[in-house]
Amino acid sequence: MDIYEAIKRRRDVRSTFKGDPIDEGTLAKILMAGHLAPSVGYSQPWNFILIRDVQTRKKILEETLRQREEFAQKLDDDRRKLFNTIKIEGILDTPINVVVTCDPSRFGPNVLGRHTMPETCAYSAVLAVGNIWLAARAEGVGIGWVSFMDKDRVKGILNIPPHVELVAYLCMGYVTNFPEIPELEERGWNRRLPLSELVFMERWGMSPEEDFRRRLDETKI
Ligand SMILES: Cc1cc2nc3c(=O)[nH]c(=O)nc-3n(C[C@H](O)[C@H](O)[C@H](O)COP(=O)(O)O)c2cc1C
């Protein structure tokens, strides 16, 4: 699978997990793809916590369901009805969950580039997630990112030290199929924006010329 194909065919997966285990060789390759991500000042601020224990995952699921309910209460009736049909996690449907953290103290206070933008620590960890997501897709492994959680509660469950940030909670497993389009688009929750509306020329808010706008929207990868 070439890089564009992996980008195009990657999906956030919630509904099509099979539950059979990922062999350690494949898992190690996917994690290595994460570890090869760029990072601010080469600080490699990530750790990867692999969670197989079902009791631990049940505690996290409880937290996620609580957050789901709180979110549902904020929606109007139509939106809530739609939301109630959407699956937002695969915590127990997958053989393994992977938490990606970032440690802002790694290599001390003088990390090149992080001194002006401390948030680049988390950005680096997110790039590791991007690599993991694409590598997993190339291996036929699906990933669902779950952010319905109070980070501090989950950090407590996983013994993550206070200064370390929880960046991503990923449910990972083989799938029956990868959906062609994002599930949230399929369900009518949201749609992909035209690329031409997101590209500006030279200054914020300045649209490209018509020909290039058309090219942006018609380009296939
Ligand atoms: C930072 C982040 C957090 C997300 N959190 C959730 C989540 O809690 N539950 C969920 O179902 N999907 C979650 N997603 C997946 C998005 O809904 C999904 O990426 C989006 O709908 C586009 O679909 P695609 O990833 O298949 O292209 C998250 C994605 C990102 C990048």
Image: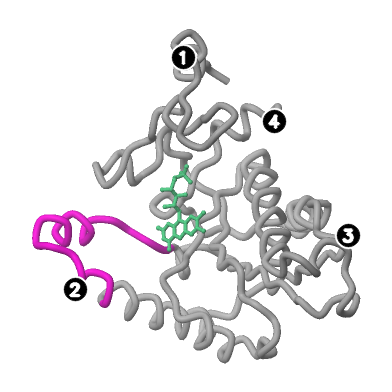
Image point 83% across, 64% down: which residue? 44
Residue 65, image x, y percentages? 33, 76
Mark 1 and mark 4 lie on one chain; the one further toward the N terminus is 4
In front: label 3 or label 2: 3
> How crowded is the residue under tag 4: few (<14 C-alpha within 10 Å), some, or many (20+)?
few
Residue 173: x and y in percent read 56, 56
Residue at the left extreme of this rendering = 77
Tell me the mark number nearer the camera, choosing from 4 and 2.
2
SS class, disc 2:
helix
According to the picture, the residue beneath numbered tag 3 turns out to be: 42
- Nearer the observer, 77 or 132: 77
**Earlier-in-chain disc, 1 versus 2:** 2
Q: Residue at x 69, y 74 (%)?
A: 49
Q: Secondary structure at mark 3?
A: helix
Amino acid type indicated by mark 2: Gln
Gap in Å between the C-alphas at discs 3 and 2? 43 Å
Secondary structure of the residue carrying numbered label 4: helix
Type of colouring: one colour
Report the residue marked by disc 1. Answer: 218
Looking at marks 4 and 3 on the same chain, the residue that comes earlier in the sequence is marked by 4
Q: Disc 1 marks which amino acid?
A: Glu
Q: Quadrant of the C terminus?
A: top right
Q: Which residues lie in the magenta part?
A: 70-89
Task: Find residue 50 and report its horizontal and vertical position in percent.
Answer: 68, 72
Asked whether the beta carbons under mark 4 and mark 2 sit within 8 Å of each other, the answer is no
Q: Which residue is mark 2?
A: 73
Label 4 vs label 3: CA separation?
Answer: 23 Å
